Image (cartoon, grey):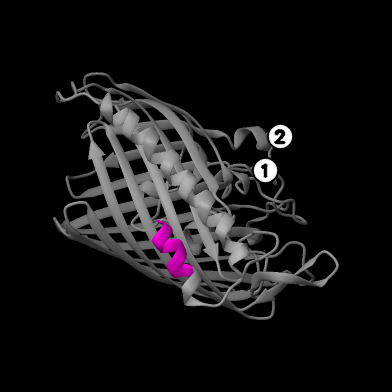
């Protein structure tokens, strides 16, 4: 890891004093992180775990993102997860318990708590005629799951879920361990990670699954009104290696609940995978009429990303993700901008017993253009106003540990 720090310094003639402390903190964090992993591995069970409907676990995620713009506020503009740079960042700590709903035991549940930088921006900022945090949102952001489910004995099994659950929208997970890259895409960060409401999922055949949702809104911690929103999902496997998913969202996300102001959002995903490769293409598009603007203009945003992962050999994998995000009217990111980014990731995985450790080294280049585009840089253009620059280069060391029963 110290070699990585020295390499980063040698690539450009930056002030060494600005980096040495950060690298040392990254090294210290990495050592502490894998000390915890190894201590747990030493106590890992050698025998095969007994099958059970009950599961529990814990997860830790930390990183050191080296941002060559050196923003004085340490912030990553337009990003929800991994929002801090140039410091060791404890992004996620999570614990959970889950009981599966099965034909032999039809009731299920999920409960869990979470904390870290990745939860800090889940609470929306108040906007005119739009987002308004739900009461207690600053506490509710620490809830990772809270739902009950029932597998009804109808046909192939109708699963009903009520409470806080994973969003049906999007290809990437809120937990970095479930993704090919360490950092998530702008597409994922500006779509829901969680939803609160009711879900009904039904496997029509072994290759076709349908689902419908009645939820409290696009952002589960936002409450601009009391009218529910709706969602649908169709998941089809035309062949063993292929999965096609189409998600739709439709609902009121502004104070005026007239149908003319309802938000429509589409999320389309095509995935192909075999033993070594995973390739997926995702495309999103959303629109709504703005209540707060004169003439109620139609707002639009769209995004696309290609996800490529290759298991090289043994513990080694590589991943690559080009993406774009166009927020034409600044509705989702808060700025009228076109963001393009390319991310490459090298992963080393340790799996012993019920524990998994991941070491990820990632490089990404981000570019934001448009009338309000840009990323934070060093210095201020006015008192209290951070400077912006179109480009951003980051080298990120990610350390992840998980225990699953």
Residue 22, can we see it?
yes
Residue drawn at 67 percent across, 64 percent down: 334
Query: Measuring 65% from the left and 59% from the top, which residue is drawn there?
Result: 74
- The reply to whether the magenta stretch includes residue 30 is no
Q: Image check: 68 left or right of 167?
A: right
Pick the front one: 199 or 276 = 276
Q: Quick check: marks 1 and 2 in contact, CB under 8 Å? A: yes
C-alpha span from label 1 to label 2? 9 Å
Q: In which quadrant of the rendered image does the N terminus lie?
A: bottom left
Region in magenta = 1-8
Residue 137 pos. (x, y %): 66, 37
* Residue nearer the viewer, 262 or 105: 105
Mark 2, Cα crowd under 10 Å, few <14 / some 14-19 / many 20+, is few
User: What residue is rendered at 37% in x and 63% in y?
Assistant: 268
Vertical relation: 35 (above or below) 305: above
- Say which of 186 and 163 sits in front: 186
Q: Quadrant of residue 307?
A: bottom left
């Amino acid at each position: 890891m110290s070699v990585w720090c020295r390499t980063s310094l040698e690539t450009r003639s930056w002030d060494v004093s600005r980096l040495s402390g950060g690298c040392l903190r990254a090294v210290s964090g990495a050592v502490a992180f894998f000390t915890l992993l190894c201590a747990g591995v030493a106590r890992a069970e050698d025998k095969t775990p007994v099958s059970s409907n009950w599961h529990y676990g814990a997860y830790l995620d930390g990183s050191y993102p080296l941002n060559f713009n050196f923003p004085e506020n340490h912030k990553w503009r337009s990003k929800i997860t991994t929002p801090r740079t140039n410091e060791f960042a404890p992004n996620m700590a999570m614990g959970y318990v889950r009981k599966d709903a099965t034909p032999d035991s039809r009731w299920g549940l999920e409960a869990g708590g979470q904390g870290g930088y990745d939860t800090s921006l889940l609470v929306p900022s108040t906007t005119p005629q739009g987002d308004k945090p739900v009461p207690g949102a600053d506490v509710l952001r620490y809830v990772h799951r809270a739902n009950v489910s029932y597998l009804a004995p109808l046909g192939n099994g109708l699963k009903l879920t009520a409470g806080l659950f994973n969003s049906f929208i999007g290809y990437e997970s809120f937990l970095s361990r479930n993704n090919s890259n360490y950092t998530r895409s702008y597409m994922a960060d500006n779509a829901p990670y969680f939803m609160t409401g009711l879900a009904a999922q039904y496997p029509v055949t072994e290759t076709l699954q349908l689902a419908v949702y009645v939820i409290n809104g696009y952002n589960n911690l936002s409450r601009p009104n009391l009218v529910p929103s709706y969602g649908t999902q169709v998941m089809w496997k035309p062949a063993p290696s292929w999965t096609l998913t189409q998600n739709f969202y439709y609902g009121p996300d502004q104070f005026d609940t007239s149908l003319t102001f309802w938000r429509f959002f589409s999320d389309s995903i095509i995935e192909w995978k075999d033993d070594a490769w995973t390739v997926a293409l995702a495309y999103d598009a959303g629109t709504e009429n703005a209540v707060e603007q004169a003439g109620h203009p139609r707002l639009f945003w769209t995004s696309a990303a290609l996800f490529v992962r290759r298991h090289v050999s043994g513990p080694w994998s590589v991943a690559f993700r080009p993406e774009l995000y166009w927020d034409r009217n600044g509705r989702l990111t808060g700025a009228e901008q076109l963001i393009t980014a390319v991310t490459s990731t090298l992963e080393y995985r340790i799996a012993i017993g019920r524990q998994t450790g991941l070491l990820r080294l990632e490089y990404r280049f981000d570019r934001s253009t448009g009338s309000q585009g840009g990323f934070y840089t060093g210095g201020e253009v006015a008192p209290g106003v951070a400077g912006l620059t179109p480009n951003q280069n980051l080298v990120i060391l990610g350390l992840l540990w998980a225990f699953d029963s």
